[in-house]
Image (tube, rainbow, N blue to C red):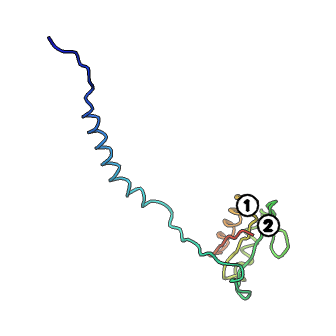
Amino acid sequence: MRDSFNEINITPLTDIFLVLLIIMMVIAPMLDQQGLQLAVPEVVNESQILKDTKIMNINVEADNRILWNDNELQSAGLEEFFSKHSKEFSDGLLIQADENSEHGTIVRIMDSARNSGFTSISLSRG
């Protein structure tokens, strides 16, 4: 008579897991290579910024008001404003944002500045 089957053979299961492990080890380095090429910014103290540089300073208040030289700017006219002043401020744009300001406001400023010709845009908590 044949004995009843009481144990589960796990050898095929371990073979499958080993094959999956090898596949993941081969694929994982390839996944690391994708992504954005970002330059990590340097930490700069405000005292290190020279007064004679041609950097435009934009302030974003906690209530998302956009200020330049204590004048409030409207979101709708940002691109036109930056186009008009991009030649004067050849060293770039510094956005000093309050920590309670909204991310969307800062992104809108950065997009408008980049579309208007600013190539160097920095962000600071102000």
> Position of 41 compared to 93: left or right?
left
Residue placed furthest toward the right: 71
Dot 2 and dot 1 residues touching (CB under 8 Å): yes
The answer to which of marks 2 and 1 sits earlier in the sequence is 2
Q: Nearer the viewer, residue 17 or 118?
A: 17
From the top left corner, tell me how far across and down residue 42 is, in percent.
59, 75
Residue 110 x %, y %: 67, 67
Residue at (75%, 76%) from the top-left corner?
A: 57
Q: Position of residue 106 (x, y in %)?
A: 71, 63
Above or below: residue 17 compared with residue 2: below
Judged from the image, the secondary structure of the residue bearing numbered disc 1 is helix
> Which residue appears at 76% of the width and 72% of the height?
58
- For image coordinates 73% across by 73% down, the residue present is 82
Name the residue beneath numbered marker 2.
66
Q: Amino acid at mark 1?
A: Thr
| Residue 69 image position (x, y, % from top left) | 83, 76
Residue 56 is drawn in which quadrant?
Answer: bottom right
Disc 2, SS:
strand
Residue under numbered circle 1: 105
Work out whether 15 lies above or below 105.
above
Badge 2 crowding class, 10 Å Cα cut-off, few under 14, some 14 to 19, many 20 or more, is many
Amino acid at the residue labelled 2:
Ile
**Quarter residue 78 falls in:** bottom right
Along the viewing direction, whichever of 45 and 103 lies nearer the viewer: 45
Name the quadrant of the C terminus. Answer: bottom right
